[in-house]
Amino acid sequence: MRVTGFVIHQSRCTSINGKGFDFFVARSGIVIPGAETTEPGRVHICLEGDFATNDGSLDPETEEQLFVAARLIARLSEAFGVPPDAISPHRDGCPGARFPWRKLVLSISDGYH
């Protein structure tokens, strides 16, 4: 399978319903792989939470969750040879208008945001 990018979801998305992702990143930072591939060519990552209605501030648990998601993207991008910034939202409204996209960008060379 040739991977071309990553799609980000939030768990409050009505189309998720416990499926529709390749990896689920819980607020605790635990990564749970999906049962089967969602879409050939793109890796779907769902983050637990509602990024549409939050106030834009991030609590420590969400900061950790986003760091774990960024590390997952970095490792998958290395494994599949796809740029780590080849990230797109699932659709309008998902992962939410206040999703902190900059938190998903890691420098592979130094391991930091």
Image (cartoon, rainbow, N blue to C red):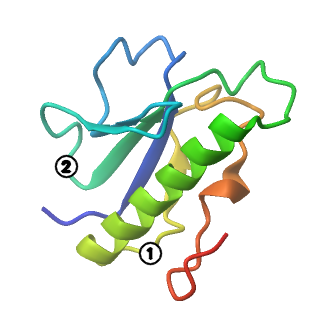
Using residue 11 as the reference point, say whether residue 78 is left or right of it.
left
Looking at the picture, does residue 11 appear above or below residue 57? above
Using residue 77 as the reference point, say whether residue 11 is left or right of it.
right
To which quarter of the image does residue 37 belong? Answer: top left
The circle drawn on residue 50 is: none
- Residue 32, how many percent across, how many down? 29, 36
Of circles 2 and 1, the one toward us is: 1
Q: Residue at x 55, y 77 (%)?
A: 111
- Quarter of the N terminus within the rendering: bottom left
The amino acid marked with disc number 2 is Pro
- Residue 27, how many percent across, how many down? 53, 31
For the view shown, which residue lies furthest in the bottom direction?
Answer: 109
| Helix, strand or loop for disc 1 | loop
Q: State which tag comes first along the sequence, 2 or 1.
A: 2
- Residue 56, how many percent across, how many down? 85, 34
Mark 1, residues whose alpha carbon is within 10 Å: few (<14), some, or many (≥20)? Answer: some
- Residue 11, how many percent across, how many down? 49, 21
| Helix, strand or loop for disc 2 | loop
Q: CA distance from mark 2 to mark 1?
A: 17 Å
Q: Residue at x 31, y 52 (%)?
A: 42
Using residue 80 as the reference point, say whether residue 9 is left or right of it.
right
Q: Residue at x 67, y 29 (%)?
A: 96
Viewer-side residue, 75 vs 22: 75
The amino acid marked with disc number 1 is Pro
Asked if the residue under mark 1 is in contact with the one under mark 2, i.e. CB atoms within 8 Å, the reply is no
Q: Which residue is mark 2?
A: 40
Viewer-side residue, 44 vs 41: 44
Mark 2, residues whose alpha carbon is within 10 Å: few (<14), some, or many (≥20)? Answer: few
Q: Which residue is mark 1?
A: 83
- Quarter of the C terminus within the rendering: bottom right
Q: Residue at x 60, y 32 (%)?
A: 95
